[in-house]
Amino acid sequence: MDSKWIPPPPGAALGLEITVEKADGAKCPRCWNYHTVQGNPQGLCDRCISAILEGLPHWVATGVFTQEQADDFRAEVRAMVNRWKVKG
C-alpha cells in the first residue's frame, strides 16, 4: 500500500478556494504593512507617520532623536502634504 493520505486544500470543506497574490503598493520599512501612498517621507505608511509625529516630543526629550532630526521629519511631512494639496 504505497498511497499516502493527502489532506484537502484549506477551505475546501467550506467550498472555498484560497489564493495568495502579491500585494499592491510598497512595504513600509517600519511596520512592514503594504500601502499605496506614494511620496511619503522615507517610504513610511500614513499610520507610521502619524505614530512618529505623535511620539516625536517624547523621543526628543529622551534623546532618541535630536530636535534637528524631529524638525527635519516634520518638514518632510509638511512638504508631502503640500504636494498633495497642489495635486488635489
Image (tube, rainbow, N blue to C red):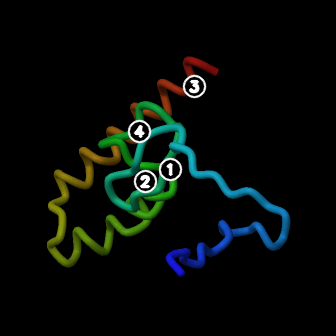
Mark 4 and 3 residues: CB-CB less than 8 Å, in contact? no
Disc 4 target residue: 40
Are the two marked residues, 4 and 1, in contact with CB atoms closer than 8 angstroms? yes
**In this view of the protein, which residue sits in the foreground, 40 or 4?**
4
Q: Which mark is residue 85?
A: 3
For the residues labelled 2 and 1, the Cα–Cα distance comes to: 5 Å
In this rendering, would 76 be left or right of 83? left
Residue 10 lies, with reference to residue 25, above or below; the image says: below
Residue bearing mark 2: 49
Pointer 4 and pointer 2: residues touching (CB < 8 Å)?
A: yes
For disc 1, the marked residue is: 46
Q: Residues within 10 Å of mark 4 (few under 14, many from 20)?
A: some
In the image, residue 22 sits, relative to residue 59, either above or below, namely above
Dot 1 crowding, Cα within 10 Å, few <14, some 14–19, many 20+: some
Q: Secondary structure at mark 2?
A: helix
Q: CA distance from mark 4 to mark 2?
A: 8 Å
Which amino acid does the dot numbered 2 rest on?
A: Ile
The front one of 43 and 88 is 43
Identify the element where label 1 is drawn: helix
Give 49 or 71, whichever is nearer the viewer: 49
Spot occupied by residue 20 in the image (x, y as percentages of width and height): 58, 51
